[in-house]
């Protein structure tokens, strides 16, 4: 009877321990931070199953997979134009820094670091460019923002994987000014192309006229008295070749010729 009671107590104790979950699982893309009565340890726990003391210890999961964040905000350009910037960022927590991310950032790097860091970097870089330069030198602006972000985020164990400027938006007045300038530039380019075309056509006409004049001048130089006599002789020869041997009886119907046949 006593043995059965001990077995029952042992089974109940085991079930109690199992109910308290003495095991913790770290899924893929995460690392674990173990706390004992709320105090985090310095060890980083990898993916898999780990033993924890019920009640006293608890395993906290910190994602080290790539995470995406989007945000927008207003800033001022170098020429004091209001710029509304929309950005997208991909980042991840360094696996060796999960303890500090959990302890210092409350396991909320997006809210604590990413958003304010992006806003600060965008404002700082935007202030170094004019509104037009933000559009024409967009890749350079992006690279400088990434550099500022990496320096700030690296101090907190965060890594920038990708960063892109989704859109720059300016005030209505500035947008209208840009549109007007673009239209003026297009009209100017069209006028320049038309002028070039007209100049080319004029040069072509002059060239054709010069060629025709030179051809006529050359022809006039080639017409000499000797050439005229040669052409006359050639024409007479052609006429003789075509003559059938009979003389005409009349010419013009006024002065009669002598009738040779009689």
Image (cartoon, rainbow, N blue to C red):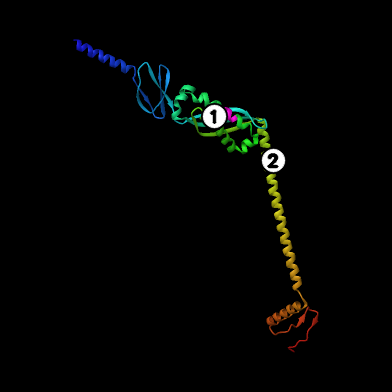
> Looking at the image, which residue sits at the far right?
255
Q: Percent x, y for residue 185?
A: 68, 42
Residue range (magenta) = 118-122
**Relative to 254, residue 205 above or below:** above
| Secondary element type, mark 1 | helix
Tell me the distance, in whole angstroms, between the alpha carbons under discs 1 and 2.
43 Å
- Left-right relation of 48 to 113: left
- Left-right relation of 234 to 153: right
**Relative to 209, residue 36 above or below:** above
Quarter holding the N terminus is top left
Q: Percent x, y for residue 149?
A: 54, 31
Determine if the magenta segment contains residue 85. Answer: no
Q: Main secondary structure of the magenta part?
A: helix
Q: Which residue is mark 1?
A: 152
- Residue occupying the point 22% across, 11% down: 5
Q: Which residue is mark 2?
A: 184
- Residue occupying the point 71% across, 50% down: 195
**Relative to 5, residue 130 above or below:** below
Report the front residue among 257 and 179.
Answer: 179
- Residue 25 seen: yes
């Amino acid at each position: 009877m006593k043995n059965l009671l001990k077995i029952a107590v042992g089974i109940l104790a085991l079930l109690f321990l199992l109910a308290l979950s003495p095991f913790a699982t770290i899924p893929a893309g995460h690392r674990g931070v173990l706390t004992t009565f709320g105090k985090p340890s310095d060890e980083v726990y990898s993916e898999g199953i780990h033993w924890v003391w019920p009640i006293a210890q608890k395993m906290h999961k910190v994602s080290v997979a790539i995470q995406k964040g989007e945000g927008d905000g207003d800033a001022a350009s170098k020429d004091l134009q209001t710029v509304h910037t929309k950005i997208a960022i991909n980042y991840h927590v360094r696996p060796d820094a999960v303890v500090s991310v959990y302890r210092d950032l409350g396991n909320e790097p997006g809210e604590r670091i990413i958003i304010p860091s992006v806003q600060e970097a965008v404002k700082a870089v935007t202030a170094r460019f004019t509104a037009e330069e933000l559009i024409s030198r967009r890749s350079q602006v992006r690279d400088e923002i990434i550099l500022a972000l990496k320096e700030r985020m690296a101090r907190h164990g965060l890594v920038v994987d990708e960063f892109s400027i989704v859109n720059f938006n300016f005030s209505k007045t500035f947008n209208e000014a840009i549109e007007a300038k673009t239209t003026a530039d297009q009209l100017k380019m069209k006028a320049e192309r038309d002028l070039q075309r007209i100049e080319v056509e004029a040069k072509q006409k002059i060239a054709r006229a010069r060629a025709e004049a030179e051809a006529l001048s050359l022809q006039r130089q080639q017409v000499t008295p000797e050439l005229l006599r040669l052409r006359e002789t050639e024409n007479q020869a052609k006429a003789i070749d075509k003559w059938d041997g009979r003389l005409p009886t009349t010419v013009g119907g006024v002065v009669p010729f002598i009738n040779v046949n009689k």
